[in-house]
Image: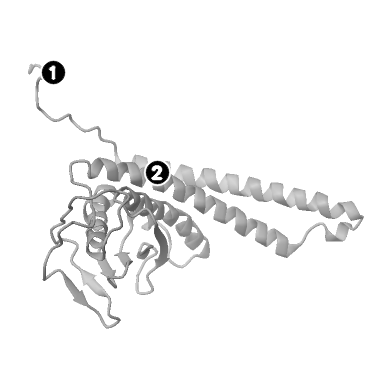
Amino acid sequence: MTAAPGPASSAPPVPNQVAECSYEFLLSEILQWVQRDEKRVAEQARQVQQAASGQDGSPERNLSPNNEEAAAVMAAERSAARIERMGYDVGYRLCERLAQHRPLMGPGSPSPEGGTASADASGNSNIDVNAPIIMGGGGHNTVMDPKTQLEAVKFLCKEFWTEVFRKQIDKLQTNHRGVFVLKDQELKWLRRLPPDEESARVGAIRILAFPCGLIRGALANLGLSGAVVSCDFLADGKTMASCSFNIKVK
């Protein structure tokens, strides 16, 4: 029997591991919990509106389809915002762990030269996410130049995305003016959703709020705290799992 290393041992600690399906089950439960809470809030808003409308003695005005629809939309937006905040917190903490042995990024960071980008017909550059990532000195409160922003996004597409999804982003495009498009042809959290059902699309939008938060949190930890992230489905995708994340750095 091998003795456990003593306090002076330099052996790295064994990381704790958990099955990937456990996280997928947890995400599913989070979405169901948020959806139940969304229905509860919408019902409360409907009851308040009904009580307020009935005060003038006009029962026929108690229920307004337009107001009910607006309340449902607001409840859905609140749910998406809540899921995104969860993703932000997870993304920030995970990026802190992944990048803790790297120097902080900043305006003085060097950048790779040549051979890593090609322009498409729209003028956007297709970035090679496998190119070496260079992270230089700086701090979280400094303003990054476009080249350093690109290094941060490349870190997100490569190390961060691989840690979460066991694969890199399939395609990264940028206009070199603070706009980045990250394309994933098969986001595994969406693989089981049928592509032709509207209800599945609504569910996918809820799910995508979490990786949007992951991206915002990771970028905030890397110094891009003002990034705006949105998502969409790829028109040329064969399944619901084909999606893109659009990042705008302010």
* Residue 166 visible in the snapshot: no
Amino acid at circle 2:
Asp
Residue that extends furthest to the bottom in the rendered view of this protein: 121
Residue 146: quadrant of the picture: bottom left
In this picture, residue 5 sits left or right of residue 176: left
Residue 12: quadrant of the picture: top left
Quadrant, the C terminus: bottom left
Question: Residue 29, percent across and down?
Answer: 47, 42
Secondary structure, mark 1, is: loop
How packed mark 1 is, by other alpha carbons closer than 10 Å (few <14, some 14-19, many 20 or more), is: few
In this picture, residue 177 sits left or right of residue 108: right
* Residue 198 visible in the snapshot: yes
Residue ID for mark 1: 7
Question: Residue 114, percent across and down?
Answer: 11, 70
Nearest the viewer among 220 and 201 is 220
Q: In the rendering, which numbered label is found on residue 89?
A: 2
Residue that extends furthest to the right in the rendered view of this protein: 57
Amino acid at circle 1:
Pro
Secondary structure, mark 2, is: helix
Q: CA distance from mark 1 to mark 2?
A: 33 Å
Q: Residue at x 54, y 50 (%)?
A: 79
Q: Residue at x 15, y 55 (%)?
A: 134
Residue that extends furthest to the left in the rendered view of this protein: 2
Residue 61 to residue 19: above or below? below
Question: Which circle's residue, 1 or 2, is located before the other in the chain?
Answer: 1
How packed mark 2 is, by other alpha carbons closer than 10 Å (few <14, some 14-19, many 20 or more), is: some
Residue 155: quadrant of the picture: bottom left
Q: Residue at x 29, y 36 (%)?
A: 18
